[in-house]
Image: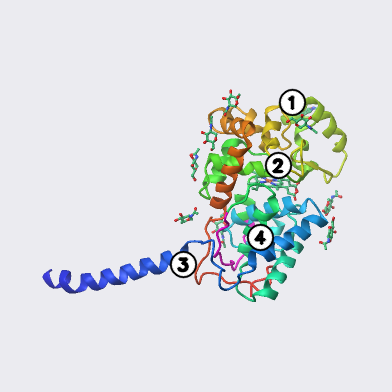
Amino acid sequence: MEKWSSTITPTLLIVFLMLCLSTTATSQLTSNFYATTCPTLLQIVRRQVKIAIKNETRMAASLLRLHFHDCFVNGCDASVLLDGTDGEKFAGANLNSARGFEVVDAIKSAVESACSGVVSCADILAIAARDASGGPTWKVLLGRRDGLVANQTGANNALPTPFESVDQIIVKFAAVGLNTTDVVALSGGHTIGLARCTTFSTRLFNFSGTGTADPTMDTDMVTDLQSLCPQSSDGNATTALDQNSTDLFDNHYFKNLLIGKGLLSSDQVLFSSSEAASTTKTLVENYSNDSSNFFQDFASSMIKMGNISILTGSEGEIRTNCRVVN
Ligand code: HEM
Ligand SMILES: *[C@@H]1O[C@H](CO)[C@@H](O)[C@H](O)[C@H]1NC(C)=O
Ligand SMILES: *[C@@H]1O[C@H](CO)[C@@H](O)[C@H](O)[C@H]1NC(C)=O
Ligand SMILES: *[C@@H]1O[C@H](CO)[C@@H](O)[C@H](O)[C@H]1NC(C)=O
Ligand SMILES: *[C@@H]1O[C@H](CO)[C@@H](O)[C@H](O)[C@H]1NC(C)=O
Ligand SMILES: *[C@@H]1O[C@H](CO)[C@@H](O)[C@H](O)[C@H]1NC(C)=O
Ligand SMILES: *[C@@H]1O[C@H](CO)[C@@H](O)[C@H](O)[C@H]1NC(C)=O
Ligand SMILES: *[C@@H]1O[C@H](CO)[C@@H](O)[C@H](O)[C@H]1NC(C)=O
Ligand SMILES: *[C@@H]1O[C@H](CO)[C@@H](O)[C@H](O)[C@H]1NC(C)=O
Ligand SMILES: *[C@@H]1O[C@H](CO)[C@@H](O)[C@H](O)[C@H]1NC(C)=O
């Protein structure tokens, strides 16, 4: 007893402390992670994102969404970028839907030319999402490593669908450590970008077998969307998620919900469903009242989302080509 406490304990204590230090040194993301290894990284990504959006405005939205779809499946590890029939690109939420992969390739290639083999694809997605959104800015945290596997089943299970209830969506966010504030603030990402008829047409004609359109949708909007998405159509036509100001990152997404102009069911239920009253409705009203509250919460929720189950230190790898493991 005497011997154990006087000799072994101090040694164990030192080993323990060293372990703690080494883990904390590698497990946290930092904003200056590439300060010496790739000092021009942020400028390079910003420039490439700007070029891509200048070519196609919608790319802003597509890049923002890619980071979300990456982070919810096996963490922010660029697993969404991996090609292959077992990849996440073939999961329900991504098939014929996720886009921007060529732009990520272009960014990666510009980054590799300046600093070869040091910047992860997962970090590129995080920086591109921030720069693309055109909304509030924040200090993006870096140091993620790229994963070695894609998880198609994980993508099918973890990503929310536009047909789910508020409670179901809250559960999926909670599974990755995000709360109800994050659900509402991040749903505000739908202030930009487009959605296909197939993601909302169940609301237009015979909603839940009622014989009419979803009663929570504004009737003029129902009429417009019925002509965009006739029942005989293939479901591939697109329209703005924010019907008021699609290219502008603003709080009209929330203002729309107050007047029945949310496009997806999963948008409108944040305000109109019975569950919303005790969960999301007040937040929707708050963000519709004051865009600076939305911007502030969106930025902190993006930082939180960017921190989901990250790989750091010697975990994973730095992919050379974002589409394949090394
Ligand atoms: C809360 C649960 C969410 C659901 C159910 C959902 C669902 C959807 C759906 C169905 C689409 C249209 C896809 C298509 O037509 O192919 C879409 C688009 C989009 N989503 Fe979400 N989403 C959610 C959360 C988020 C979050 C957290 C973000 C980012 C912060 C986001 C950003 C976007 C963007 C920017 C687009 C447009 C993409 C483009 O135009 O290429 N979404 N989402
Ligand atoms: C520009 O955008 C169009 C779609 O609008 C796309 O087909 C094309 O590949 C893009 N070009 C570049 C260089 O990104
Ligand atoms: C795939 O994701 C699910 C969560 O939906 C997780 O339980 C599983 O461990 C993941 N599989 C791999 C191979 O990462
Ligand atoms: C969600 O978490 C944030 C901190 O990340 C906190 O400020 C906020 O109050 C939480 N929201 C809810 C509804 O618990
Ligand atoms: C609506 O759907 C229900 C059940 O799915 C069906 O019984 C009903 O005939 C449909 N009504 C119309 C007008 O198509
Ligand atoms: C919808 O578009 C996708 C490609 O984006 C295509 O594969 C599919 O066949 C289209 N659907 C129909 C019914 O044309
Ligand atoms: C957008 O919303 C504003 C009010 O915030 C309204 O005055 C304007 O008419 C709306 N525009 C469209 C296209 O819905
Ligand atoms: C929104 O603003 C209205 C009018 O100024 C106010 O009555 C309401 O309490 C506000 N709601 C929230 C959630 O901030
Ligand atoms: C609105 O949201 C902001 C930012 O999250 C918060 O500080 C404020 O207390 C909220 N106000 C109301 C009335 O909910
Ligand atoms: C990221 O997650 C780690 C581990 O869960 C946590 O210790 C850290 O505070 C988080 N950082 C941010 C910025 O959320």
Q: Position of residue 65 (x, y in %)?
A: 68, 51
Q: Determine the image quadrant of residue 114.
A: bottom right
Which amino acid type corresponds to the residue marked 3 in the rendered image? Thr
CA distance for labels 2 and 3 = 35 Å
> Circle 4 is placed at which residue position?
80
Quadrant of the rendering where the C terminus is positioned: bottom right
Say what secondary structure mark 4 lies in: helix
Residue at 25 percent of width and 73 percent of height: 11
Q: Earlier in the sequence, mark 2 or mark 3?
A: 3
- Could you classify mark 1 by the number of other residues whose Cα lies within 10 Å: few (under 14), some (14-19), or many (20 or more)? few
CA distance for labels 4 and 2 = 23 Å
Say what secondary structure mark 1 lies in: loop
Q: Position of residue 276 (x, y in %)?
A: 58, 30
> Circle 1 is placed at which residue position?
210
Q: Earlier in the sequence, mark 1 or mark 4?
A: 4
CA distance for labels 3 and 4 = 23 Å
Colour mapping used in the image: rainbow
Asked if ligand 5 lies within 8 A of label 1, the reply is: yes
Q: Which mark is residue 26?
A: 3
Which amino acid type corresponds to the residue marked 2 in the rendered image? Thr
Q: Position of residue 325 (x, y in %)?
A: 64, 72
Q: Which residues are magenta?
A: 139-153
Q: Determine the image quadrant of residue 166.
A: top right
| Pick the front one: 242 or 290 | 290
Asked if ligand 3 lies within 8 A of label 4, the reply is: no
Q: Earlier in the sequence, mark 3 or mark 4?
A: 3
Q: Earlier in the sequence, mark 1 or mark 2?
A: 2
Q: Which mark is residue 191?
A: 2
Say what secondary structure mark 2 lies in: helix
Comparing marks 4 and 2, which lies closer to the viewer?
Answer: 2
